[in-house]
Image (cartoon, rainbow, N blue to C red):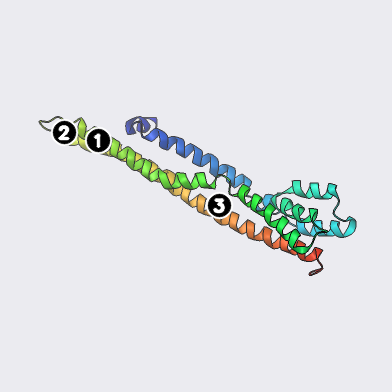
Amino acid sequence: MFAILQAAGWPIWPLLFASIVAVALIIERLITLRRSKIVPEGLLEKVVGELRQSGATPEMINRVALSSPLGRVLAAGLRNVRSPRDVMKEAIEESGRAVSHDLERFLTTLGTIASISPLMGLFGTVVGMIEIFGSQAPGGSNPQQLAHGISIALYNTGFGLVIAIPSMIFWRHFRATVDGLIVEMEQQAIRLVEVVHGDRR
């Protein structure tokens, strides 16, 4: 493997760095974007039950806010539980935008790596081809040496695609996951507003 990296030349080192960053981001997002961590099962029911029993106390609101991203959204509504419906919804929406931004963290970087890796690989191939043709003697060339040089230059393109394909798959997966989690949080927050303002039991 190290021999391939050496043979492919200096353009492969940025690709190697991009691959390390992509793997790190994929692992981090897989750990962070777990449904049980973002939208814990039964949290809304627990919050509603406690709200009816003892009201929205500061201690309860802080505990809910620290529990999960959904908890942060619900806590924003609980802080405005005595306010009109529109004010409560606005507070929830503001908190939801902040939570949404946090859930989308690093996805732009992963998407960028997926997009530019093939271009970086192509750049490495072009550099390799320039070096190959530049090193040929004016009187003639060795076809075997030329073929070997071309195969080495193509390592960059291959490596770029190896990075881009999984990065694109995971980027699309994480985008869909975040969108689904945001919709679910919105639905639960709306249920909280309806329960507080007597539209739903």
The residue at which mark 3 appears reads as 174
Q: Percent from the top left, x then y, of residue 85?
A: 77, 63
Mark 2 vs 1, N-terminal side: 1
Q: Percent from the top left, x then y, of residue 63?
A: 80, 47
**As drawn, is 140 to the left or to the right of 114?**
left
Q: Mark 2 and mark 1 in contact? Answer it, CB < 8 Å.
A: no
Q: Give how far apart the Cα atoms at labels 1 and 3 are.
A: 39 Å
Crowding near pointer 1: few (<14 within 10 Å), some, many (20+)? Answer: few
For label 3, the SS is helix
21 or 8: which is nearer to us? 21
Crowding near pointer 2: few (<14 within 10 Å), some, many (20+)? Answer: few
74 or 28: which is nearer to us? 74
Q: Amino acid at mark 3?
A: Phe
The residue at which mark 2 appears reads as 142
Mark 2 vs 3, N-terminal side: 2
Q: Is residue 115 above or below residue 185?
A: above
Q: Which mark is residue 59?
A: none
Q: Give how far apart the Cα atoms at labels 2 and 1 are.
A: 16 Å
Q: Percent from the top left, x then y, of residue 72?
A: 73, 50
Q: Is residue 98 above or below residue 139?
A: below
| Quarter of the rendering occupied by the N terminus | top left
**As drawn, is 152 to the left or to the right of 101?**
left
Q: Is residue 155 visible?
A: no
For label 2, the SS is loop
Q: Is residue 15 visible?
A: yes
Q: Nearer the viewer, mark 2 or mark 1?
A: 1
**As drawn, is 38 to the left or to the right of 155?**
right
Name the residue located 75 percent from the left edge and 53 percent from the top edge: 76
